[in-house]
Amino acid sequence: MKYVKHIMIGIKRLTVLGKIGLGVVLMVLFLAVFSDWLALHPYSIPSGDALEAPGAGHWLGTDDLGIDIWAQICFGARISILVGFGTALLAGIGGSIIGIFSGYSGGLTDKLVMRLTDLVIVLPDLPMMIVLGAFFGPSVRNIIIVLALFSWTIPTRIVRSKVLSVKQEKYVEAAMSYGAGFWHLTLRHFLPNILPLVMVSVIRLTSRAIVAEASLAFLGLGDPISKSWGLILNHAINFKGIYFTDYWKWWVVSPITAIMLLVTAIAFISRDMERIINTKA
Amino acid sequence: MEHSIIRVENLSVCYHSEKRRTRAVNKVSFNLDRGSSLGIIGESGSGKTSIALAMMGLLKKVATVDGQVYYEDKELNSLAEKERNLYRWGKIAIVFQNSLDVLNPVLTVHEQILECLLRHTVLTGPAADEKVVQLLELVGLKAGWNMHYPHQLSGGMRQRVLLAMALSCDPEILIVDEPTTALDAMAKDEIVRLLVKLHREKKFALLVISHEMQIISRLASRVMVMYGGHIVEEGLTKDVLKNPLHTYTRGLIQSSPAINPYRDLWGIPGEAEQNNPEGCPFYDRCNQKILECQAKLPLLEYISLERRVACNRGGITTLLTGRELHKSFVFKGKTIKACDNCDLTIRSGEVVVLIGESGSGKTTLASILAGVSTPDEGEVLFEGEKIKGNSATSRKNGLQIVFQDPFTATNEHLSIAQVVKEPLDILKLGTKDEKLNNVRQALQDVQLPSDDEFINKKCHCLSGGQRQRVALARSLVMEPKLLIADEISSMLDPSTQANVLRLLKGLQNTRGFAMLFITHDLALARKIADRVYVMYNGKIIEHGSAVEVFDSPKESYTNKLVDNLL
Amino acid sequence: MNKSSSILKKASEYLLTFLVILTLNFFIPRLMPGDPFIFLSSSEGQVTITYSEEQIAKYKAYYGLDKPMIVQYTSYLANLLQGNIGYSIYYNNSVLSVIGKRVIWTVSIVLAAIFISCLIGTVLGSLSAWYRNGTFDKVLYSFIIAISEIPAFLIGIMFLFILAAKLGWFPLSGGIKTFANYSNSVEKITDILHHAFLPVLTLSIVRLGEFYLLSRNSMIAVLTKDYMRTARAKGLHNKRIIFRHALKNALLPIVTRVFLSLGAVFSGAILVENVFNYPGVGRLMREAVMVRDYVLIQGIFLFVAVTVLTMNLLADIIYRRLDPRVN
């Protein structure tokens, strides 16, 4: 119950844009979870004529194979949410743990971790993802793992530098003089300081991962079995004559709108979070 | 007046932030003559740097600046930026407070000095380069530092570069803001020497801003003391140091360990926060405030030829004056002059020590001053009124005396409450509850318990130190402006003596009463004295500030006393 | 002396990083799950390549999978040292020359985009800082923040549909007209610029936010520094204060960011090239994946990684040159 109250207070501090953003994200989450009920048609087999305009049967029309686009959008939300939150949680939690450990132990461990983050930061991420995707197969699970491999450095660096600065504080010195160990320091002193930072960076990672997955899928290099928003776009753009007909009005606009809505909504939330954290500090 | 190079009139600076406006400088006026020197001293936040920035015209964006700054006869604040730029550095240069960022980190020392020359002098090319080297040598830096970047220099070297930069265009006026912050003692001394030398050679007018009295005293012949954006005192540095006339100036000087080598340090109680914009800025912390001060802003007025003070009471007031006091006793047919033409003044809030061996007449003098005995000749004035009998002791906010022997000073058969309450009972001051509260408060002040069990104890249960503190509490309930303490610690053991003395000095500092401390113990006197009177054979043979008397005694007797101490 | 030795240290760090990348590149095909050469795409409408027995044998021989790992590794490194980064089976040509044919297209749009976004971003950022918290600053700030959230390929697609397909101002795809006969070189250059316009515009818009925010922050920080007050006190001309004292400090992080952003710009270029069917390395990479030309994919990755690393090293060196505080 305490947490519910905390969350309610947190929501109250958001701006109007932040609340709208939160609403949109919750809506997409709803789509993703209940897509089986919300999508009236199957998302992978034809349910109508090819290239039907939006209407009563097919709310957002159909594609060249006669597959319902609304159904594709609903199931695409699943992929986006899965990839977004999956990557963010994996990289956020993993990266934070590495960051705490690296900042806490210092010395050689810290140096090694920092060299490793340097390496990952230098590597161009999209080409590397393409290479890994090409060799290991572009399943959703692999995409999440690869994205996480490229994202953990962000929380790691933030958390590490915060831990380093907290370690300088006198209260940590005092606690250590009483014999406090790693767990005590982490739970009592580090976590309260880094949690807000980790939260912001998790939100940003979510958005980054969603964009990356959409980009890969758009290139046709994503998971070919998962109908993600990027893949809808990929099909649409590769349809001959898309530029010269009116089909783009539903076939291209729908996935673009979906991606933009979700990404900007998350951006609004993360800006608000940053503002709240900065004013608190 | 006609040879002033810069004249500041009614300068006010007001900073605006979203929440409030802060007046940093309030109607400040002063002149600076060609080749003269002036110091501005004050705590951080007193507005002294704002004056410098306003004189340079560097505050325009962030604050409103009112008033005029005249260079010769040209008013600078009304000039456009372009015209003003011609006065900046060429005529008025400033050495900013030293920090790593005060010099541009990506430009060499050479370029940062050179650009001043190119802008304000006719020098160009190799001649200008040569001049840069000369300037560096002038401030004691080798030419090799020329091509270095600021971060490669030490703090002292950066200060020298700043100085060379400021002097590059031979300014008529040099403003130096906190020239020695962040420097160690050696570097500090070198910079001050350098400044003194350069001032003598270059003949610019020097405006020194600092919070350290000893820096000002070495660099500036005149000083202005700032508090809360106001100038509270102005005068010749020597005089101000020796005889401060504003309570704030005195507090500032007493806080300086360099000026007070012997005495314990006592800061000014309270925080520098001004609550009443209409009244005196120092009201909350002043020890001689009167009702008027809360509402009336004092103006800076001349009180002697070279001295101006902004105080509604005309500076530190004189509490007690003894004039030409004579007293003799006849003992076995012989006349003994216990007091022979003694003059003595005590000003509000100061600790005066009357020092002398036993039999020198100091106790007699004390009893005359307190009105306990009447002088044969002469008079004693307390706050301007002549003391007759107990006229000064039998009232609140008057004069109180604490005696040497705690055992005879308090009646051992009375309870502690009765003893402390006695003056209130006699004078019928307050109700029963009020009196009891006063008693408890006084006992707490002298660090004795104030519970019922303790205050109902009889005095004979107490030790000497405790009895002395009870006697002290009895005086304190009368909230005296002057406390005469006659050898109060001589009968106590050393540890108790130290405790009682610290207690007394602490009370004096927070309450702000004046004290006449009578002792034969020179070492003790040095710990607490602002001013000293030396008494010998019924005469006052020497008096002056504590440092004067202890460092360079004029009389051979005092000399002997000081020598014996070592 | 000190300066050059620290650059040497940095360079050796980069060399180590480079070695790690090479090793990674070596192990990726060897760590593939199952047999990579019979991996099939099951997606509908995709280019599907099935390798014949003969091709698989060829690949296995190429990678030398029958030899011990250490022998494979050393011969791999030896090949690299000779500049041999592989042979593309699909294009039947050396990887280096396949890339070489495409690289000029990518490099031009990447450089043009960095130049434009950096220039405009820095100017706008500095103006925003100068007028900070004014209407101009607030409007520009929100606008650029909003733009920089949109993914690169979406901006590209929108331009493609609106400016190219609907309005017909720009060609829909390619880097140059096919089968065109140009009467003179001016015509040819104009055509190339015409084709490059949308890709460059898209990439520039994507990068604009970064440079804008960076220069705005950096300028705001510089404007409040003590040395700016010192410069004003010296009565210097405004021009000198702004260009010599403020800009020299504020530009430091921007200059290095130009080089550091190359990796990100290249990732953007892959997407943008595929949106506009632009004949650069980015499209080549997608093609290579589609036809499962593993050697080519690795070659491109290696090429990109080396370029990005070199630029990072360059950024380090330039920063040392510009900022005297770094020893």
Image (tube, rainbow, N blue to C red):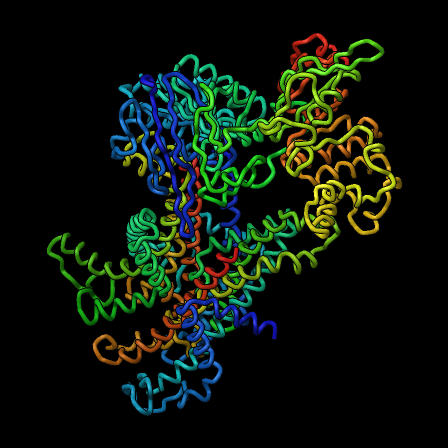
Residue B33 image offset from top left, x and y in percent:
37, 19
Is C41 left or right of B125, judged from the image as shown? right
Viewer-proximal residue among B72 and C244: B72
Left or right of residue C154, residue B334 in this image: right
Residue situated furthest right in the rendering: B461
Q: Residue at x 60, y 53 (%)?
A: A163
Q: Is residue B495 visible?
A: yes
Q: Quadrant of the N terminus of chain B?
A: top left
Dividing the picture into quadrants, the one containing residue B111 is top left
Q: Residue at x 47, y 60 (%)?
A: A274
Where residue B521 appears, as percent x and y from the top left, is 77, 21
Front-most of B217 and B246? Answer: B246
Q: Residue A72 at x, y = what percent?
A: 39, 82
Q: Quadrant of the C terminus of chain B?
A: top right
Q: Taking the image as drawn, is residue A175 in sight? A: no
Q: Is residue B71 left or right of residue B330?
A: left
